[in-house]
Amino acid sequence: MEKTLHRAGLFIVTGYRHRKALTGIAGPMTRIATVLTVLFALITAACVAFGAYFSYVTLLSANRAAVEERFTVTAARVATTAELANSLGIAVASQHTLEELVAREAGLDAAVRSIDVADEHGQIVFSSDAARQGTTLPPRAAAMVSRRIENDIGAAIGRVAVSYDPAVLQRDAAQLAADIRVFAVPAVLLAALATGLAGLLIAGNVGRALRNAGNPAQWPASAQAALGRLDRAHAAALVGAPAAGEAK
């Protein structure tokens, strides 16, 4: 029985010592939590920054589609006129009124560089830029939209191409970037700051909890009373005698 009490006393004393060791690890634990907080703050800021970048790319694509739709409407108007004349038996190359039409349409929008009308062989027969007449219209090119000219049975008999100034897209891209920076930069900073403050608050609470756990003076009264009973039990177990309270 005496050996059992002695072993129990040693076990309790070991646990008591471990409790005291909590105060020693409070500092390292707080430092680790602080490092993790900085890391999470950087990750949060990076996520917000990537979100802003993807928003910029999405808006840039939408803006490009809107700009090109504007010029596609112009090409459609010219193509519709050519198709109407073709339905009356006038071949595309013989529709000389298209020369005036493309010149007028090009003058309506300063961003339009040229409007070309090509026949079924891709040869430019009419253009708002006289230097382009007689050249071959490329199937596709940067800063250009096109629309097929079809006959009554849907076969291609020509093509209308509108070439525009790419500076239009560049100006819009620069404006979008400036607008997004106005919101993105504060959002990144606020996200990093909020994450950092929350992490530092948690780290402080962890360190304080560990220090309190190793300091009985910070324990509740009931826990301190229980500790007093354990201390008396420790002493009794180590000397092999009953505690004073129990003798009574």
Image (spheres, grey):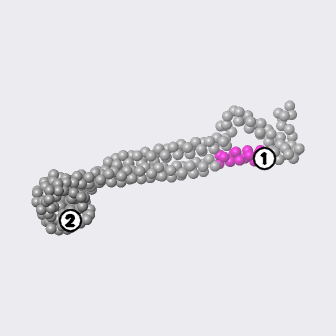
Q: Which mark is residue 11?
A: 1
**The C terminus appears in which quarter of the rendering?**
top right
Mark in front: 2 vs 1? 2
Label 2, label 1: how far apart the Cα atoms are: 98 Å
At horizontal 71% and vertical 36% (from top left) the residue drawn is: 223
User: Residue 124's x, y, as percent?
Assistant: 17, 65
Q: Earlier in the sequence, mark 2 or mark 1?
A: 1
- Three-letter residue code for mark 1: Phe
Image location (x, y in percent) of residue 92:
16, 61
Residue designated by label 2? 120
Residue 221 vs residue 195: left or right? right
Tell me if label 2 and label 1 are in contact, CB under 8 Å. no
In screen coordinates, is 242 left or right of 75? Answer: right
Given the current orientation, which residue lies at the most extreme top position? 248
- The magenta segment is 11-24
x then y, percent, for residue 186: 39, 46
Residue 132 in the image: above or below residue 245: below
Kind of residue at badge 2: Glu
- Residue 58 place in picture, x, y as percent: 36, 52
Q: Is residue 174 visible?
A: no
x 70%, y 45%: residue: 19
Which one is in front, 53 or 75? 75
**Mark 2: which secondary structure?**
loop
Residue occupying image coordinates x 74% and y 36%: 226
Query: Dot 2: within a 10 Å radius of its alpha carbon, few (fewer than 14), some, or many (20 or more) residues?
Result: some
Find out whether residue 77 is within the magenta segment. Answer: no
Taking the magenta stretch, the answer to whether it contains residue 14 is yes
The residue located at (33%, 54%) in the rendering is: 61
